[in-house]
């Protein structure tokens, strides 16, 4: 129970920082979607390029975060040597990648559809190489149980990004101030400066990790490197396949969409799924705390019971978040410019897909703890194949709605397969009945909220949805969080 309390504490810190950081980052969405109209397609460029970035960060970290945690807690390994070896490995691969980009920038940009703007590709690909390297010092902060510094740096990075975006997109054009000649005639905005800002923030964050970079001095161990590579390569395949489930649609869309306005349509999809990213916040916060927790808990006798309880509460709180977003959609839609509102119908689909991804992540530890990481590659690979097939077949007909349903199907398949095979190799008695009850109640309330959103004025829909959300909270409290068990105030609820 003490370990579980530690998990809750770390999750709260990581979760708060993740929520604050994402909340701050959300300011980019209304700012950019207001300044870059849907018809202009600039936000479609941002969506497309960042989809490539999300895959590259997986490729360039090649599962070394999880591998780092595994080897730092493994008997017989020297933690200092493991950290130093990991730093040097990821630094070397990031440097090689940067050199390749410089040598072959034009053909790479042309293949991506940006022959006239290779700077889009160059700036962001160098940024991702630095980001991949800094992932290891950030992992060390998590290992060392230093969530405050971890959270502070993440929030600082995003805050700086927001400030520079506001200056470039709003303040300088309003003041007619053109520092260093960054604007052309008429203060026309260019997407590339959004990418330059990202690079600047990444470099500043790198320098702020200088204390953690001292880990280089502990040397490089070839034997440790080979053992880590043996463990991590299936994680790389799994990570790429898993990220394909999130990014492949945005990458494939320009190649299979039938119209000439692919940038506009992709921009609408990319803007609206930002509203669904609250699920990514919750899953990411849980992952940051849960991953080192699981490996440290692996020798305890009650580990399976703890994993089952963690799964249940993860699902409860993500379903609550889902209903909150649906219930207050009439407010949250202002996170994106009005020209993008036609795409809001993808939000519920993407949110449920993200919940299933979180469940899949929680299930994944059976093969990580048993060193059968190859299974993760298979599960994610199968999901990626499902997604790509649906995208190829349906994007020409259904545009970005095909992307939303493709992700839904991919995560559902990966989750189901992982559960059944996990019960064979590492059986855990998950509270399936309780989970089914919560899912059923959520479905009923979702239908009620959608009906209110579609049939009632905004003020009335918000009132009805608030009541429905409070009913769900009351149901949770009654069933799994009796107030009488709470510290201090619990005595006022006991009979």
Image (cartoon, rainbow, N blue to C red):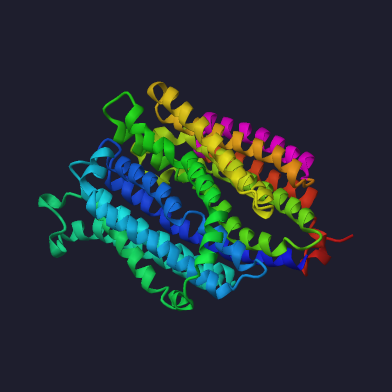
Q: In which quarter of the image is the C terminus?
A: bottom right
Can residue 455 be found in the magenta stretch? Answer: yes
- Residue nearest the viewer, comparing 185 with 483: 185
**Does the rendering let one see residue 469?**
yes
Report the residue that reaches farthest toward the front: 223
Specify whether residue 194 is in view: no
From which residue to which does the magenta span run? 430-458
x, y percentage for residue 118? 21, 47
- Picture residue at 30% right of the left edge, 64% below the top: 200
Side of 72 relative to 335 (left or right): right
- Position of 143 compared to 106: left or right? right
Q: Main secondary structure of the magenta part?
A: helix
Above-or-below relation of 23 to 380: below
Outermost residue on the right side: it is: 495
Residue 294 to residue 338: above or below: below
Q: Is 177 situated left or right of 431 in this image? A: left
Q: Residue 5, percent across and down?
A: 72, 66
Residue under the point 39% across and 38% down: 250
- The residue nearer to you, when weighing 277 against 325, is 277
């Amino acid at each position: 129970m003490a370990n579980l309390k530690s998990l809750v504490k770390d999750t709260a810190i990581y979760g708060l920082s993740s929520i604050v950081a994402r909340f701050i980052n959300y300011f980019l969405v209304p700012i950019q979607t207001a300044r870059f109209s849907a018809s202009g397609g600039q936000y479609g460029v941002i969506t497309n390029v960042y989809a490539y970035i999300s895959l590259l960060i997986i490729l360039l970290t090649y599962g070394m975060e999880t591998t780092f945690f595994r080897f730092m807690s493994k008997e017989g390994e020297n933690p200092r040597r493991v950290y130093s070896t990991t730093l040097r490995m990821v630094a070397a691969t990031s440097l090689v990648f940067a050199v390749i980009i410089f040598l072959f920038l034009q053909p790479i940009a042309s293949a991506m559809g940006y022959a006239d703007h290779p700077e889009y590709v160059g700036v962001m690909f160098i940024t991702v190489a630095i980001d991949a390297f800094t992932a290891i010092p950030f992992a060390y902060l998590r290992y060392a149980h230093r969530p405050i510094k971890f959270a502070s740096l993440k929030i600082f990075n995003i805050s700086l990004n927001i400030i520079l975006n506001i200056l470039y997109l709003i303040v300088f054009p309003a003041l007619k101030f053109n520092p260093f000649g960054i604007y052309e005639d008429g203060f026309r905005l260019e997407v590339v400066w959004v990418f330059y800002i990202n690079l600047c923030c990444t470099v500043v964050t790198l320098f702020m990790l200088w204390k953690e970079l001292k880990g280089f001095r502990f040397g490089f161990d070839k034997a440790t490197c080979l053992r880590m590579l043996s463990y991590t390569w299936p994680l790389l395949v799994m990570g790429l396949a898993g990220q394909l489930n999130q990014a492949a649609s945005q990458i494939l869309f320009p190649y299979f969409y039938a119209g000439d306005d692919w940038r506009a349509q992709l921009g609408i999809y990319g803007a609206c799924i930002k509203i669904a990213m609250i699920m990514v916040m919750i899953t990411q916060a849980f992952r940051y705390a849960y991953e080192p927790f699981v490996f440290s808990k692996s020798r305890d006798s009650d580990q399976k019971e703890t994993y089952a309880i963690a799964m249940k509460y993860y699902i409860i709180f993500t379903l609550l978040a889902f209903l909150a977003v649906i219930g207050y959609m009439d407010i949250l839609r202002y996170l994106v410019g009005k020209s993008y509102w036609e795409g809001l119908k993808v939000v519920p689909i993407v949110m449920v897909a993200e919940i299933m991804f979180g469940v899949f992540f929680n299930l994944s530890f059976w093969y990580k703890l048993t060193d059968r990481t190859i299974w993760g590659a298979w599960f994610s690979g199968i999901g990626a194949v499902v997604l790509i097939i649906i995208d190829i077949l349906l994007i020409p007909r259904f545009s970005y709605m095909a992307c939303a349903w493709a992700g839904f199907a991919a995560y559902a398949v990966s989750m189901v397969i992982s559960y059944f095979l996990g019960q064979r190799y590492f059986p855990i008695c998950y509270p399936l009945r309780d989970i089914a009850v919560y899912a059923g109640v959520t479905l009923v309330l979702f239908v009620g909220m959608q009906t209110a959103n579609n049939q009632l004025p905004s003020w009335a829909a918000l009132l009805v949805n608030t009541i429905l959300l409070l009913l769900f909270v009351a149901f949770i409290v009654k069933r799994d969080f009796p107030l009488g068990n709470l510290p201090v105030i619990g005595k006022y609820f006991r009979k």
